[in-house]
Image (cartoon, rainbow, N blue to C red):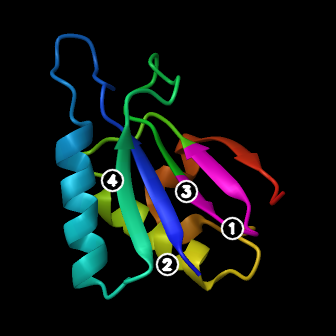
Amino acid sequence: MHHRVTVCETCAAAGENPRGHGFADELRALFDSAGLPDVTVDTVACLNSCAEPTALSFRAAGKWAYLFSNVDPTQDGENVLAFARLYLNSKDGEITDARSCGRLRHCLRGRIPAG
């Protein structure tokens, strides 16, 4: 099954430059080094979470979709990796215990059931 992580490329805190492209590159490297071959990391112009940068989403066919915001690219890479492991190992994408994802579990803004 193919999984997709999408990072907002224009998210930026006040007075900062957008960090989405760099964060997407960091996540690709993390996923590659962790041996997660079925994950694509893309960027998109906007995930409509401008008030709480940086935003990213997780999606896969037949699984719940997740939207996170207020993700800190300087400190949350490992937390995103932890969530990716849970998501990839879940049959339907429903994550019931995200404590291993550290601060990221408090950044969840929405989830959408599989269609």
Write down the region rendered in magenta.
58-67
Name the amino acid type tagged 1. Answer: Ala
Labels 1 and 3 touching (C-beta < 8 A):
no
Name the amino acid type tagged 2. Answer: Arg
Labels 1 and 2 touching (C-beta < 8 A):
no
Q: Is residue 100 magenta?
A: no
Q: Residue furthest top?
A: 15
**Dot 2 crowding, Cα within 10 Å, few <14, some 14–19, many 20+:** some
Which quadrant holds the N terminus? bottom right
Which quadrant holds the C terminus? bottom right
Depth check, mark 3 against mark 4: the one in front is 3
Labels 4 and 1 touching (C-beta < 8 A):
no
Which residue sits at x=26%, y=11%? 14
Q: Secondary structure at mark 4?
A: loop
Labels 3 and 4 touching (C-beta < 8 A):
no
The picture places residue 12, in percent across and down from the top left corner, at: 28, 23
Name the amino acid type tagged 3. Answer: Phe
Toward which corner of the image does residue 109 lie, by quadrant?
A: top right
Q: Secondary structure at mark 2?
A: helix
Residue identified by numbered label 2: 85
Q: Name the main secondary structure of what is drawn in magenta.
A: strand
Which residue sits at x=44%, y=34%? 70
Depth check, mark 3 against mark 2: the one in front is 3
Depth check, mark 1 against mark 2: the one in front is 1
State which tag comes first along the sequence, 3 or 2. 3
Toward which corner of the image does residue 2 lie, by quadrant?
A: bottom right
**Dot 1 crowding, Cα within 10 Å, few <14, some 14–19, many 20+:** some
